[in-house]
Amino acid sequence: MTNDLVEFATHSDVLVLIGTNTSECHPIIAMQMLRGIERGAKMIVIDPKKTDMAKKADIYIQTPVGYNIPFLNAMINYIIQENLYDKNFVENFSHGFEYVKEAVKEFTPKRVEDETGISQELVKQAARTYAKANAAAICYTMGMTQFIDGTSNIFSLSNLAILTGNLGKKGAGVNPLRGQNNVQGSCDMGALPNVVPNGPVTSKEVRDHIKDIWGYEISEKIGYALTVAPDKIEEEKLKLLYVFGENPVMSDPWTEHFVHAVEHLETFIVQDIFLTETAQKADVVLPAASWGEKDGTFLNTSRRVQLIRKAVDAPNNLDPDWKVVANIAKELDIKGFDYTCAEDIWNEVRKVNPKFFGGISYERIDKNDGISWPCPDLDHPGTPVLYEGNKSMLPDGKFKLVPVIYSEDKEQRVKLEQEFIEKTNMPKDYPIGSGALSEKVNELYPCLFTTGRKVYHYHTGTMTRECKPLELGSDIMGATIEVSEDIARERKLDEGCYALVENKRGKIAAKVNINRDLRHGTIFTTFHYAEADGNVLANAEEKDPLSGMNPLKMTIAKIKKISEEEFLSVRNQTDIQMHPSELYRAVRRQ
Amino acid sequence: MSLPLKNKYVIADPNVCIGCATCMAACYESAYERGKLAVPRLIVTRTNSGTMPNQCRQCDDAPCANVCPVGALEFEKDCIALHEEICIGCKMCTVACPFGAIRPEAELMPSIDYTMEPKYNLTIQSEVGVKSIAVKCDLCVGREDGPSCVEVCPTNALSFRDNLNNNFIEEKAQKTVESFTKEKMKYK
């Protein structure tokens, strides 16, 4: 996040929530937003599902799944046409206005209305409300990023923020609401294929700095993205997989393919606190200490480094994760892992990336209850608001407006981008984005299929489904398939009947819940339940060209009513796929 | 003059509720700790117009208690008490309740694999061998700190109305009249 999440309560005048079900997925952030609304902030919600936040919103726009770039471009176009953009900010602090203007010129609110039936007045109203606000924050989550044009979606959001000058001030910014307590931290620490904690591996300067500290030469080659791992395993380029606190059998798209791929591995190691669906397929399972049983730091969505202290001792004197890694390194005879405590590792992080973390000592985090990076020295107060003084982190200190074009045919994206570059004489290294749909509904698979979360479960339910008050108290529904009213009507699905959803990648069966909050033609399910995991159907073949992200939030499927016997037979198959050994089945779910 | 408000009750504010269902988890835990049937007694209900937990209003002339054939539901001095051990699972109260706040439930049995037999089968058509009984909000009777849902609610959407006077009605009436008269003045 460019800003701190408490600013939603104290400073934001307008909140734009796009592709996020904030109250269910980030209840604490939603709470801050509601405080902001009580103070008088306006809220715009854009989502295919009329979420609880949408019901509280001033403007709600129900877009089809994946229809982000034409919509955002229309908003940008209207803001430019009506001269609602911040001319001072655009002229003095950014590049590329003419490219964006060119890219959006064919996208009008009228076009949005023609293509989706969303009233153009509503689009205009949203654009006006956002552009005229003193401080407007954009918040987004996986409903923006998990598409084959996810990166371009975010380009569009940053374009909106730059055009309206909503950067570098309190209560504004572009804010990805992170889904885990430390996902920002793991990215900052280099748990990505292309970076180390102080920058990209392709930069010589970065590698030299690392060599000074670690004493090793590191490779300049960018590693494999997670999304290509199953393919690389099948090609036998990847022989060992070490999974840490993740449950990719359920969270990765196209389960059948993934399960098939991991069988090819020479060694499959899983380290987790419970015997997850993934751990059940592993060769070696290492037990792990849970979050309350170890010391360390978490780096939250606001980039704030926070301390966590052990509350109880781990059972059987289990080592914390860092120690497990250090022990493995020792076995492999790799030097440099002689840490005595988590603080030692943090102090090394401060040395590796002094620009961001240099001034964040344990003592200071403790005293200040967390410090946001960048914080280069011990006198620096931390940076809850990025880009203050309208200065970006790029070498020239200016922001880049990135043109985002749209292609009706996903195969034509590169060609259209090339044409656009030629037409506008853009410099070769200037970024450009493009949007397209990964799959379009057809006669065989006439419904849009998307996934999401329920407030009472967390991701694949590794922890929350083991927690009885949540599993038996909060979650009284169990796994359901939510369908929009028209789908239920056309297929004569009743509330609570059994249904089978399938596409070319797999099938899931569960009870039907007719959800009037869904946009027409949409099926929604969660990925919390091994017995009906939405990711079984998710698209793993296609990827975002820039980030490698799969379109987890969008695929196509068909649905039909089934009898109880058929339901039980599909459930049984799913159960065997997820929990191959009967012994494990009994361990995992009572 | 109006009657003093006798019965205590828990009520939610849909404008503040974010539907996080923490109340349901707390309710389960409280029931479990107090040795009651371990199921949530309030249900976060999601509708097209908004979301809030729905639970027993502890009605003065409670239809559920009036209709109960065995006296499992009893008029107590400040609430409607439910004696689980007497309940025969006849579901009359469920039919009578105008709020949908009392329902038959049964606890999961360890011998059944619920991944194959979804747990929500256990409501009205209960499984063979499981006796269903009525459950409703019992205001966490026996719990020192009062209703646990109110205690855990992160947005203070839930409140426990136990100050047994009706001052707040008069306050509200005055506020309404004030705002009405103010509006009315504008169009004189």
Image: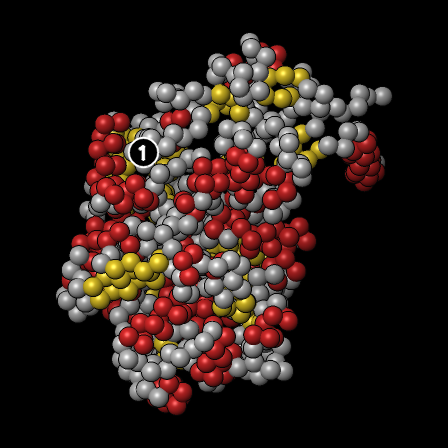
Measured from the top left, where is residue A380 in percent x and y?
Answer: 61, 80
Left or right: residue A573 versus residue A210 is left
Point 63% across, 57% down: residue: A9
Point 64% across, 26% down: residue: B57
Measured from the top left, where is residue A394 in percent x and y?
Answer: 46, 81
Give the farthest residue toward the front. Answer: A316
Measured from the top left, where is residue A186 in percent x and y?
Answer: 42, 68
Quarter of the figure with residue B2: top right
User: What residue is shown with label 1?
Assistant: B113
Point 25% across, 31% down: residue: A568
Viewer-nearest residue: B41 or A287: A287
Q: Quadrant of the N terminus of chain B?
A: top right
Give the farthest residue toward the top. Answer: B69
Label 1 marks which chain's residue? B
Q: Using the rendered image of the protein, determine whether residue A543 is visible from the camera's viewpoint.
A: no
Count the marks: how many? 1
Q: Quadrant of the C terminus of chain B?
A: top right
Quarter of the figure with residue B78: top right
Three-letter amino acid code at the position of disc 1: Asp
Up/down of A2 relative to A259, above or below: below
For label 1, the SS is loop
Left or right: residue A388 versus residue A263 is right
Quarter of the figure with residue A169: bottom right
Measured from the top left, where is residue B61 in percent x and y?
Answer: 67, 16
Up/down of A349 relative to A183, above or below: below
